[in-house]
Image: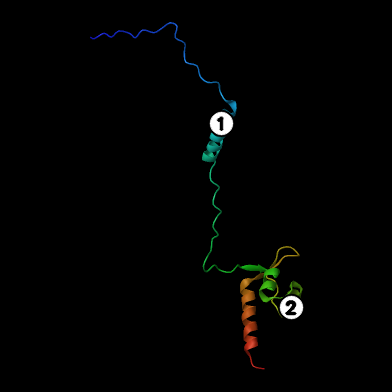
Amino acid sequence: MLQTKPTPVSVDAQPSRREPLDLDELRRTLLVVAEYLVAALTPAPPEPPKPIILPDAPPPEYVTSREIAARINVNKTTLYRWVEAGKFPRPAIRLGTQQPRWRMSDYLAWEEARKTESDKPC
């Protein structure tokens, strides 16, 4: 085996000295690194849910007085007057004293009858 001679080291040699730390530069560097880490580790915001559109959704089984009044473009009070006068069907159910509901089928039948009445000659 070949033997090599160790390199002589001077006993008087002093270790190299670093320049003094610039605290402002260190602070700026740490801020840049911290901003990068926050941006990299922050999850992206979730996408808003897409609305579900049903092409031929069936109409609701029961409707409120507000919904019916909006469909035929009258006030709710007028709708209740028509019910009392027998010009409009009575509610099918009541959810308490202030919440009447009509069957959609009853409303559609009334609407058809109203259209056929308007088609009759005078």
Q: How many marks?
A: 2
Residue 74 picture location, percent across and down: 72, 75
Few, some or many residues within 10 Å of mark 1 (<14, 14–19, 20+): few
Q: Is residue 88 left or right of residue 35?
A: right
What residue is rendered at 63% in x and 90% in y?
120
Residue 30, picture quadrant: top right
Indicate which label's residue lies in the foreground, 1 or 2.
1
Between 79 and 11, the one nearer to me in the picture: 11
N-terminal of the two: label 1 or label 2? 1
Judging from the image, what secondary structure is the residue with disc 2 in? helix
Quadrant in the picture for residue 29: top right
**Residue denoted by label 2:** 82
Quadrant of residue 7 within the rendered picture: top left
In the image, 11: left or right of 41? left
Q: Is residue 67 left or right of residue 52?
A: right
> The residue under label 1 is which amino acid type?
Leu
Residue at point 58%, 69% (across, down)? 59
The quarter of the image holding the C terminus is: bottom right
Residue farthest toward the top in the current orientation of the protein: 11
Q: Residue at x 64, y 68 (%)?
A: 62
Residue at the far left: name it.
1
Binning the other alpha carbons within 10 Å of mark 2 as few (below 14), some (14 to 19) or many (20 upward) gives some
Mark 2 residue type: Trp
Foreground residue, 55 or 40? 40
The residue at which mark 1 appears reads as: 30
Q: Do the CB atoms of the residues marked 1 and 2 lie less than 8 Å apart?
A: no
Task: Please name the residue shown 50% across and 16% down the image.
Answer: 17
Q: Can you give x and y, in whole percent of width and height, for residue 80 in the image? A: 75, 74
**Looking at the rendering, in which quadrant would you find the N terminus?**
top left
Rendered position, 10 above or below 35: above
Q: Position of residue 115 (x, y in %)?
A: 63, 83
